[in-house]
């Protein structure tokens, strides 16, 4: 009982809550590096499908259920947002007008406006750039989107932390930035 | 059409097929490092829940559907087996008699008897040891199970490849062995 109360206090006051954006399809290796690290460090998170329904799949074809969809994401309820990249992104341009993508960009803009923690890999830096929340900030990004960045400062680094922004080149570099992100989320 | 036929020939004759054992709960970061690498390298795989149903979840609480359950696994249809570890394993001893765990150990024994490729991380080496397929072979294993290994040769290495056996200490070391496993699966 005592332990439960301590856990409740810990949950309510001591930790930051993370909204995790799950594109469809999503790279499962990237997504679950974040989720398992949050779980192991008792960081509460909610997954939001960047899609019309909570039923999404990994690049590798495994069906997943997210907690909610991105149009229902209320930034005021979270302290941080994570963008989990995937094979939805090479066709982002043709789907940019879809309500779920517009909702994602609007949510990112709000997290940025309130200077909350923002993390993502691969094409994440481009999304942050489009959402207008990476101006003048150094980022790591997939080499394919380096030239597309407008206001963010592209680098060739595996990962970069600049202020509230944590970015990694690909899912293979997430482990280089994750300890720093976990530190920020638990301090 | 021409590409389709080439893909079909490739699928039928050129690649090895992998059975992936998914314990319940499973560490998603480990599981999806294998699955996304197999997907990206066009290595066909089938996921088998080490459970009574195909509905499992990750340590981090996300619901997943596997392709099948382990009692239906026929070793003759595959060239390799992967053991994806997770939070099911600290309570393995109390569930060792369950049909799904017995089926898993029997399947591992058969893959080993036919000298097929075997890979796994964390407690994987202990399962291979119990199944009798790691005798005299060097393995990497979670520090907690080092003392429990009987016929396998425990090491303190991040990952080890010894003959047909590929093992990694934890999910955080899978990336050090995965390129070698993918190489073996595509050659």
Image (tube, coloured by chain):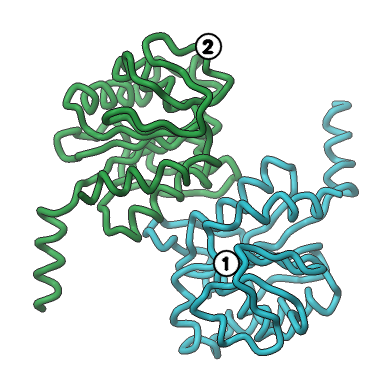
Chain colours: A cyan, B green
Q: How crowded is mark 1: few (under 14 residues within 10 Å), some or many (20 or more)?
A: many
Which label was assigned to residue A44?
none
Residue A125 in the image, given as x and y percentages of width and height: 63, 75
Query: Where is mark 2, residue-wise?
Result: B147
Residue A104 visible to an observer of this rendering: no
Name the image quarter holding residue B80: top left
Q: Which chain carries label 2?
A: B
Q: Can residue A17 be seen in this view?
A: yes
Q: In which quarter of the image is residue A45?
A: bottom right
Does residue A109 lie above or below A53 as drawn?
below
Disc 1 designates what residue?
A169
Position of the N terminus of chain B, as image quadrant, is: bottom left
* SS assignment at label 1: loop
* Residue sitting at x 29%, y 48%: B183
Position of A162 compared to B92: left or right? right
| Local secondary structure at mark 2 | helix
- Observer-nearest of B19 and A10: B19
Q: Are marks 1 and 2 on the same chain?
A: no
């Amino acid at each position: 009982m005592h332990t439960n109360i301590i856990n409740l206090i810990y949950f309510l006051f001591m930790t930051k809550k993370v909204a995790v954006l799950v594109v469809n399809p999503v790279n499962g290796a990237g997504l679950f590096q974040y989720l398992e690290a949050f779980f192991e460090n008792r960081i509460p998170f909610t997954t939001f499908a960047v899609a019309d329904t909570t039923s999404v799949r990994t690049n590798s074809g495994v069906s997943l259920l997210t907690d909610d969809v991105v149009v229902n994401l209320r930034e005021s309820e979270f302290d941080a947002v994570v963008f989990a990249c995937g094979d939805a992104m090479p066709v982002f341009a043709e789907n940019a007008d879809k309500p779920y993508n517009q909702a994602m960009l609007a949510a990112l803009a709000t997290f940025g406006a309130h200077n909350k923690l923002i993390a993502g890999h691969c094409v994440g830096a481009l999304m942050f750039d489009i959402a207008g929340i990476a101006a003048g900030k150094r980022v790591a990004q997939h080499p394919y989107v380096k030239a597309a960045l407008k206001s963010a400062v592209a680098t060739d680094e595996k990962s970069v932390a600049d202020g509230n922004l944590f970015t990694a080149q690909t899912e293979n570099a997430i482990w280089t930035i994750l300890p720093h992100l976990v530190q920020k989320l638990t301090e």
